Image (cartoon, helix red, strand yellow):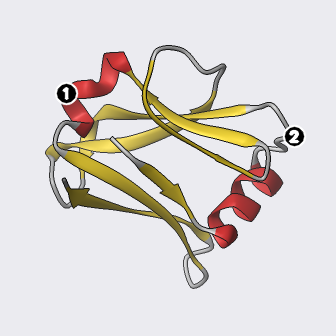
Amino acid sequence: MQIQVSDAASQWFRDELVLKTGDGVRFFGKVYGKTTVHDGFSLGMERAAVDQPIGSAVKDGVTYFASQADDWFFADYDLLVDYDPQLEEPKYQFKRR
């Protein structure tokens, strides 16, 4: 699994989560919601120490990752993380590998 984080998304995460160099952001599947590839599940994120990553990207000193426990959610997909200026929040795109 590959993760790509845009410059604008990186800035949003650093500002909103008050991240500094060495911090981590974990992406995970959570019950309820919907994505373009999962019905009944949505994408969650949290500040977390990197643990058993199945995919990661380092941007501006912050490690963005998904862990082994969420392999079921990301199986067969890469994650593209961008920023939506109209909604003022991150937007996520799943790309089939």
Cβ–Cβ under 8 Å for marks 1 and 2: no
Q: Picture coordinates of residue 49 (x, y %)?
A: 66, 19
Amino acid residing under circle 2: Lys
Using the rendered view, name the quadrant where residue 20 is placed: top right
Quarter the N terminus occupies: top left
Residue found at the far bottom of this picture: 86
Residue 53 horizontal/vertical position (percent): 46, 23
Give amino acid for label 1: Trp
Name the residue at 62% across, 73% down.
88
Is 2 situated left or right of 40 in this image? right
Q: Nearer the viewer, residue 33 or 46?
A: 46
Few, some or many residues within 10 Å of mark 1 (<14, 14–19, 20+)? few
Please tell me whether residue 88 is drawn above or below residue 75 in the rendered image. below
Label of residue 72 in the image = 1
Q: 72 or 42: nearer the eye?
A: 72
- Would you identify the image quadrant in which residue 80 lies? bottom left
Mark 2 lies on residue:
20
Neighbour class for label 2 at 10 Å: few (<14), some, many (≥20)?
few
User: Which residue appears at 26% of the width and 38% of the height?
Assistant: 74
- Image coordinates for residue 39, horizontal then vertical, percent: 12, 48
Q: Nearer the viewer, residue 52 or 92?
A: 52
Which residue is painted at 49% across and 57% down in the image?
4
